[in-house]
Structures are given as structure tokens and as C-alpha cells.
């Protein structure tokens, strides 16, 4: 695996404790998913991709993909393509003769080896100059980041996040594992003074979530001593790709999930009784909350 320069500190990180925990940020540690998507991503999707004639359906599709489905937590680029695909096949959109972008250039960028970040797109564009779809995509992505920086602040971590981090700081090496840009992650974690508990804040510039875990923890901890905490199926896949355990933060029930982690699951992880029936029951409960079929198809 080619290691991005920004991710080399993850590879070089050495254990200070016997356990490792990766923690997702948006929608997991912080209640920021709803405001970021509903107020920052979606208005810019409608604006930059000229979806005004089908704005209502675009909003429904984007909310489903990014918040209420098995695609929750997906990197912004494949999520954007999925939104367009759902719109293109929706009867109400077809009847309005709306022009929904095919996103072929964006798809090719996603399939490339370049990081799925703004810097990755810029590098890709140097090899594919003059592509209007890529140029519009970068403008959209930068506008999303600017809107987030302007609007998203003052949102504290969920109850029991800080308590969990404090309890684990002398027992586990913890890092942030996210597909959010690092600048936004650092701003949010520092704003609330919880950055002190994690050894590293890894964002989209440093590769995928699975790569974050592989670089930081791969071969460095005993079996059963690596855990990923997340609120999306992609977090669970990142854990499984590395043979790690997974603790779900259930969308819509985040406070209860963190309270259960603090009062029950954390000790099970540290004592070696988390894996197996207990973890399976939590994952079954989690998966029921994130369907594959959108409500307008049911």
C-alpha cells in the first residue's frame, strides 16, 4: 500500500498502551452529521449541480444516502455520485425532464489511485486538465468546506464521549479515524478540548478509514485489542478489513450508545469479553437502522 506523506506519522506511531481504539468524528463523537449535510452539503449540491428544478427530490436523495441508509458516512465523492444515480432513476425527476449529471469524470477520479480529497482531486486534475465537471466538483467541494467552517461550531461532543476518553486515556492508544478534512476535525476536537486524549487526528487526506487503522495499529497490538467506534457501515467495514472489533453508535440513539459504551462495553473490551455474542447483538441492532432501499421505493 502506498502511504500518503500525510499518513506517515500513523505508520510510525508505536504503542504506548496495550489497546487501540479508532473513533469516527461526524455523527459519532459529535452531533454534526445533520447540520453538515442538511445545511452545508445539500444546498451546495443543488447550487453547483443545477438541481434547482428537482431540489426537493435532490434533498430527499442526499439525506437518504448520507444520513439514513447503509451509505451513511461514505466519502463525499462516491456519496455525490450515488445521489445522482438515485435521482436519475426516480420517476418524478424523469417526468420533469431534469438534467442530472452522469458524473463520468468524477467516477473516474473515484476509481483512480488519488486520495478522495480536495488535494487529491487537484493532483488528478493536473493529469486531466480542462475538464469542466472536475472543475465544478472542486468548486462544489471547496464551497462545502467553506460553509461548514462558517456554520458548524459550538457543537459539543455527545454526552459520555468525554467521560469515555478520560477513562481510556491511560489504557488505550486512541486516534480519530474519519473521512472529514483534517482542518475541520482539528478545529472541532480542539474547540472542545478533547484533542488532548487522542494521539492522532486522521482525515481524508491520509487515506481511507481502513488504511488509517492498518497504518496505526496493524501488527502492533494483540488480537482482540483493536476496536473501531463508528456510526456508519463504512466504519464497520474498516474495522473488519483489519480484523478489529466494532462498536456501533446507533444513528438517532447516539447518547444511549455512548452511555452503554461508557457503562458497559468499554469494560468488556478491556476485559476481553466484548467479542462474540455481545458484539454480534449490537451490530444486528445497528444494521436494522440503516436500510438499502430508499423510502420512495418501498
Image: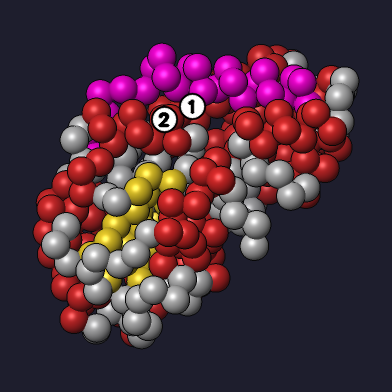
| Side of 201 where 197 appears, left or right | left
Can residue 139 be found in the magenta stretch? yes
| Side of 269 where 97 appears, left or right | right
Q: Can residue 245 be seen in this view?
A: no
What's drawn in magenta, residue-wise? Answer: 134-157
**Does residue 237 lie above or below 124 as drawn?**
below
Can residue 135 be found in the magenta stretch? yes
**Does residue 219 lie above or below 76 as drawn?**
below
> Between marks 1 and 2, how big is the CA–CA gap?
17 Å
Identify the residue shown where x is 22% and y is 69%.
17
Residue 251 point in image, percent of width and height: 38, 50
Q: Tell me which colouring the rendered structure shows.
A: secondary structure
Identify the residue shown where x is 50% and y is 17%.
146
Q: Which residue in the protein does label 2 denote?
A: 184
**Does residue 245 lie above or below 152 as drawn?**
below
Does dot 1 land on a helix, a strand or a loop? helix
Q: Which residue in the protein does label 1 denote?
A: 38
Q: In which quarter of the image is residue 136?
A: top right
Amino acid at each position: 500500500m502506498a502511504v500518503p506523506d500525510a499518513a506517515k506519522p500513523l505508520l510510525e506511531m508505536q504503542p504506548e498502551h496495550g489497546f487501540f481504539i479508532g473513533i469516527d468524528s461526524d455523527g459519532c463523537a459529535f452531533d454534526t452529521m445533520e447540520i453538515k449535510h442538511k445545511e452545508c452539503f445539500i444546498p451546495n449540491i443543488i447550487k453547483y449541480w443545477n438541481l434547482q428544478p428537482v431540489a426537493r427530490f435532490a434533498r430527499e436523495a442526499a439525506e437518504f444516502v448520507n444520513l439514513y441508509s447503509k451509505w451513511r458516512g461514505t466519502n463525499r465523492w462516491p456519496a455525490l455520485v450515488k445521489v445522482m444515480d438515485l435521482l436519475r432513476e426516480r420517476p418524478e425527476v424523469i417526468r420533469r425532464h431534469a438534467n442530472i449529471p452522469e458524473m463520468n469524470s468524477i467516477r473516474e477520479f473515484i476509481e483512480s489511485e488519488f486520495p478522495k480529497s480536495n488535494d487529491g482531486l487537484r493532483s488528478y486534475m493536473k493529469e486531466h486538465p480542462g475538464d469542466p465537471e472536475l472543475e465544478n466538483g472542486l468548486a462544489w467541494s471547496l464551497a462545502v468546506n467553506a460553509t461548514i467552517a462558517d456554520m458548524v461550531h459550538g457543537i459539543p461532543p455527545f454526552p459520555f464521549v468525554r467521560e469515555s476518553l478520560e477513562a481510556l486515556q491511560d489504557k488505550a492508544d486512541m486516534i480519530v479515524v474519519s473521512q472529514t478534512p483534517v482542518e475541520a476535525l482539528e478545529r472541532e476536537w480542539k474547540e472542545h478540548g478533547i484533542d488532548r486524549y487522542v494521539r492522532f487526528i486522521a482525515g481524508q487526506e491520509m487515506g481511507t478509514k481502513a488504511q488509517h487503522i492498518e497504518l496505526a495499529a496493524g501488527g502492533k497490538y494483540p488480537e482482540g485489542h483493536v476496536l473501531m467506534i463508528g456510526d456508519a457501515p463504512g466504519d464497520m467495514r474498516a474495522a473488519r478489513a483489519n480484523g478489529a472489533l466494532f462498536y456501533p453508535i446507533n444513528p438517532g440513539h447516539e447518547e444511549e450508545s455512548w452511555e452503554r459504551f461508557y457503562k458497559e462495553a468499554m469494560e468488556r473490551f478491556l476485559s476481553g469479553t466484548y467479542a462474540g455474542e455481545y458484539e454480534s447483538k449490537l451490530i444486528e441492532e445497528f444494521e436494522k437502522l440503516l436500510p438499502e432501499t430508499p423510502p420512495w421505493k418501498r
